[in-house]
Image: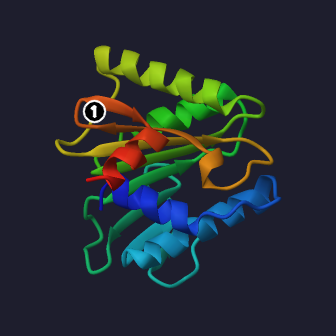
Amino acid sequence: MNARIWLAAFREEYTAKDATGAMWTTHMFEVLHRMQHRFAMHCLCEHGDGKHHEPGEALEIDLMWFKRNGGTYDVPLLALEHENSYLAAEAKKDFWRVFQVAAPLRVFIGYSRNNPEQRLEELVTLRSKGWQGDLFHRLQGGEDIALVGQRGMGGFNSWYGAVWSGNKVHRLHEFLRSRLQQ
């Protein structure tokens, strides 16, 4: 699984829903668990459905996917943080946290009350400064995704996002367009 495949599945599974707070979190984890089953992964998280799922969090990461037939201490194939708070400090903390995990695909999903594009730019700037200051490491060949939405948003095209692949950062929709043409 790579960023392109994960994002294509997210685009297919994600549906807009008029929900907030705990109801929104439940909705998002339903989306993520449909994806987990699609990819035939084992999930470690607090919001599981019981099938191919182990309740709990590792390293305070909201969700990790592993090979379904793997062992207890396998390296996760995906680490994901879903931060519901609109506070920039909370978003930055979880953004930093998920990118400390040694997984080939790492995903941050967060929100901004009014300006998701600005929140995304803050995270991209933090990430670029972090590379210089050695705050973020990525496995060779690994990819990272950041998605930022806002209350009342519509379908998949309402998300703002960035994908770190190779030595570049790509904006979400440009990344998908360029990968779909390959």
Say if 76 sits above or below 101 in the image: below
Residue at image position (77%, 34%) is 113
* Residue at image mark 1: 137
Q: Is residue 19 left or right of residue 87?
A: right
Say if 115 sits above or below 126 in the image: below
Give the x, y percent position of residue 148. Answer: 60, 40
| Helix, strand or loop under label 1 | loop
Residue at image position (53%, 54%) is 62
Q: Is residue 167 left or right of residue 129?
A: left
Given residues 98 and 118, the one toward you in this image is 118
Q: Is residue 37 left or right of residue 179?
A: right
Given residues 80 and 180, the one toward you in this image is 180
Residue at image position (44%, 61%) is 8
Q: Is residue 45 left or right of residue 70?
A: right
Residue 98 in view in this figure: no
User: Which of the 4 quarters of the picture holds residue 92?
Assistant: top right
Q: Residues within 10 Å of mark 1 (few under 14, many from 20)?
A: few
Given residues 141 and 135, the one toward you in this image is 141
Residue 82 in view in this figure: yes
Give the x, y percent position of residue 55. Answer: 53, 71
